[in-house]
């Protein structure tokens, strides 16, 4: 019987194959962004930004992403 983890992993793997030409940040930049989010009072359930609804473990890998915190983003893209 297939577990949820296996099913999700297969789904994400198939999804990644469809995404092309997406620029991602370095591991150091990703960790810096993620550390900021993990300490943010607006992170829900340890995964979801209250303002944009994004899963930060995914969003923070994208070079073009920005923190949507009103008036004073906690981290910035390019
Ligand atoms: S407001 Fe910014 S720092 Fe806070 S969880 Fe959202 S993206 Fe992360």
Image (cartoon, rainbow, N blue to C red):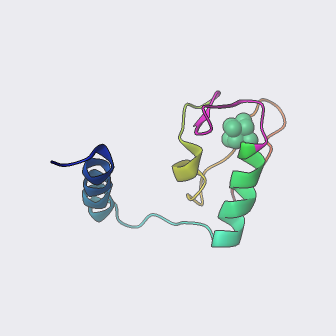
Q: Residue at horizontal 70%, vertical 66%?
A: 29
Displayed quadrant of residue 54: top right
* For residue 74, above or below residue 6: above
Q: Would residue 64 be seen by someone viewing this image from the given angle?
A: yes
Residue 8: image location, x then y, percent: 31, 48
* Quadrant the C terminus occupies: bottom right
Magenta span? 39-51
Residue 42: image location, x then y, percent: 72, 30
Asked if residue 16 lies left or right of residue 60, the reply is left
State the count of labels.
Answer: 0
Asked if residue 39 lies left or right of residue 66, the reply is right
Q: Would residue 68 be seen by someone viewing this image from the given angle?
A: no
Which secondary structure dominates the residues rendered in magenta?
loop
Front residue (pair 7, 25)? 7
- Residue extending farthest to the right is 72
Front residue (pair 68, 1)? 1
Displayed quadrant of residue 31: bottom right
Q: Residue at horizontal 75%, vertical 60%?
A: 32
Q: Residue at horizontal 75%, vertical 34%?
A: 69
Front residue (pair 48, 26)? 48
Displayed quadrant of residue 64: bottom right
Residue 30: image location, x then y, percent: 65, 62
Look at the image and say whether residue 68 sits in the magenta stretch.
Answer: no
- Residue extending farthest to the left is 1
Quarter of image, ligand 1: top right
Look at the image and say whether residue 49 sits in the magenta stretch.
Answer: yes
């Amino acid at each position: 019987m297939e577990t949820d983890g296996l099913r999700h992993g297969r789904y994400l793997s198939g999804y990644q194959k469809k995404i092309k030409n997406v620029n991602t940040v370095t591991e150091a930049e990703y960790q810096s962004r993620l550390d900021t989010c993990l300490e943010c009072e607006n992170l829900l359930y340890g995964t979801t930004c209250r303002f944009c609804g994004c899963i930060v473990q995914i969003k923070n890998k994208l070079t073009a992403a920005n923190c949507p915190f009103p008036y004073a983003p906690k981290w910035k893209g390019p």
